[in-house]
Each structure stands twice: as structure tokens, then as C-alpha cells.
Amino acid sequence: MNEFLQSMVERAAQAPKRVCFPESYNVDIITCAAAVVECGMGTPVMIGSKEQIEQLAQESGVSTVGFDYFDNTSDDQRESLAVMYEESGKTDYSHKAVVRKSKDPVNCGMFLLSLGKVDCVAAGKDYSTGDVVFSAMSFVGLADGIESPSSLGIADIPGFEGPQSSMLALADCAITAQPDASDLAGIAIASADTVRNLMGWEPRVALLAFSTKGSAEHETIDVIRQAKERVHELRPDIACDGELQFDAAIIPAVAAHKVKHDSPVAGKANVLVFPNLHAGNIGVKMVQIFGHANAYGPVLQGFKLPVCDFSRSAPVEEMLGNVAMLIVRAGE
């Protein structure tokens, strides 16, 4: 495990949490959960039959010491969940709806999260990103002021020297295809909060475009300008500026030439918000391929409570790092 992920594991171990794993019949998930216990990061809460999960773990040579369980295959357990939901005062779903919907493991995990029975949910090995996001939106909900969920990645770029040394935060690279001004503002706000809580940075958020401060005009640039104003209205504590071209956002000399007013962000941004998913997906892959960057995450953000979406191809070490970041966020 590299230095960055190891630092996240060590931070997570300082404030262990209850981590829900809905995909408990996946060997990689069981192995990751065992590593969570071994590293002292918390208690895995496995969704499903304890007997079947432990049998699979035994066959795979993985210890289940320290695991907790919620058996959503049990009618009695789902009934108890519905009763807890009613007693909490929540009214979004009826008793029957909770019993029915919690048959799905990821929905069950999200119900437990919304009720405070677990601190975070980690899924995505068997479920698609769309499945995880839809379930989180349905049963956990979005944070105040956030119009849509998004993702944030941390890139460690060899040879780059910025405010956070070789690191930059990049959003959104995985979720919202064509954000409007409200969506974009929400992405900026969520990203600022994520890097502050997860990385300890003072966020400086650049809304990227093909124009810098009126050097071009287009209706898509108007969306970015409106997003900046919305961030300033909703969260005046966040340093956010745009529209900024990529070089004007991160290179002080370029910013000095292109930006004719004082900006807390231009030339020293540590959070880059792409205008749409095309740009975000292309951008992060270019940084990885041509810049030889290590990319961590993506971190799902914008929800009321912490949720993680694994890449289906992620090795266990990467999954463990994502869970560590999730636990750190849950502790903030």
C-alpha cells in the first residue's frame, strides 16, 4: 500500500466506524472487511445470511472475527428494520415498503445508514454505480444545497508543484453528465467540503472552461458563471472562481496574465471542477496516462451521509483505501 493510502488507513484507525458492506457474498468484499478489522478501522456490518457469509469466508481462508451481521433474508429482521424506521419518525416509506425494499442488500444498507445503525456504506463490486447512487438518493438523500450527487478524485501528479505539492482534486469525473448551474454549484460545494474534511486542505475551487473571464462567449459559459454566483450565495466561505481555463487555474504566471482582478483561486486552485462529464472523464484519464498520476477514489459526495462506490475491477488494496477514506469522512 502506498504512502497516501496508508496515511488514510492510519487516520481511519484513530476513529473506527461501523462500515456496512451490502455485497457480502463477494469474496473480495469479505477480504476487504477482514482487512478493516485487522487494521483497526472499525466493525464491518455484513448484509445477508451469517451462515452463508461465514461458510464462503472459511472456504476462501478469510477470518470473520470482528464481523457484525444484518440478515435481510430474514423476514423477522426486515420487520424489525421497518419498526425502527417507524419509531425514528421517518415517513418517506411505509412499513410494508421498508420490508419489501430491504430485500435488496444495498437498499437495506442505506436504510441502516439513514437510521444511524451504521456510519457509512461501501458497495459497487456487484452493483453498478447507477444502482449505488440511486439507492443512496432514495434512502439517504442529498445534503442541503446539493442538487445532484457527484464524485471527486485525488490525483498525485509527478512533477506538478501546486499549493498541495503534487496533488489536485478533480470533480466530477463519474456521475453527472451535463450539470446545469445548480448542479455545478453543488459539485463545487461538495468538492470543497470533501477536500477540507478528507485532506485537510483549505479549498480553492476553479470552475473550468474554454474561456477565462470573458475571453470567449457561449451559452455554456453562462452556466459556469451562474454556478460561481450560486456558490458565493450559498457558501460565501468557499473560495470559488470561474470561468477559468485549466492553465489559468493552476499556473500563477498564466493567471497573472489572463486574470485582471484579484482572485483567491486563479493560479493556485487545488480543486478543479469540470464543466461536464465528457471533460472530467477525459481529463482524469489524460492525467493518469500522460502525467503518470496515481488517482485515488472516486469519492461519492453530495449525500447527507457517507457512501462509497467501488470500481468493479478494483483490487482489495484499492478497496481498503477507499473504505479508509470513507471512514475518515464519516468521522468529520
Image (cartoon, rainbow, N blue to C red):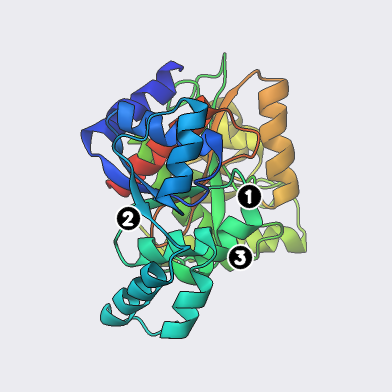
Residue 170 falls in image quadrant: top right
- Look at discs 3 and 2 and give the one toward the viewer: 2
Q: Nearer the viewer, residue 106 or 61?
A: 61
Residue appearing at x 25%, y 39% in the figure? 16
- Look at discs 1 and 2 and give the one toward the viewer: 2
Residue 71 falls in image quadrant: bottom left
Q: Residue 157's spot in the image, x, y percent?
A: 57, 21
Q: CA distance from mark 1 to mark 3?
A: 17 Å
Q: For mark 3, what is the residue? A: 181
Q: How dense is the environment of label 2, judged by Cα within 10 Å: few (below 14), some, or many (20 and up)?
A: some
Q: For mark 1, what is the residue? A: 213
Q: Residue 172's spot in the image, x, y percent?
A: 60, 48
In the image: residue 316, left or right of residue 92 = right
Q: CA distance from mark 1 to mark 2?
A: 45 Å
First in sequence, mark 3 or 2: give its number.
2
Residue appearing at x 71%, y 41% in the figure? 281
The reply to whether residue 197 is in sight is no
Q: Amino acid at mark 3?
A: Ala
Instruction: Determine whether the residue tagged by mark 3 lies in a helix, strand or loop.
Output: helix
First in sequence, mark 1 or 2: give its number.
2
Instruction: Determine whether the residue tagged by mark 2 lies in a helix, strand or loop.
Output: loop
Q: Nearer the viewer, residue 240 or 124?
A: 124
Q: How dense is the environment of label 3, judged by Cα within 10 Å: few (below 14), some, or many (20 and up)?
A: many
Instruction: Determine whether the residue tagged by mark 1 lies in a helix, strand or loop.
Output: loop
In the image: residue 8, left or right of residue 16 = right
Q: For mark 2, what is the residue? A: 118
Q: Residue 96's spot in the image, x, y percent?
A: 46, 84
First in sequence, mark 1 or 3: give its number.
3
Where 9 falls versus 119 (above or below)? above
The reply to whether residue 313 is in sight is yes
Q: Amino acid at mark 1?
A: Lys
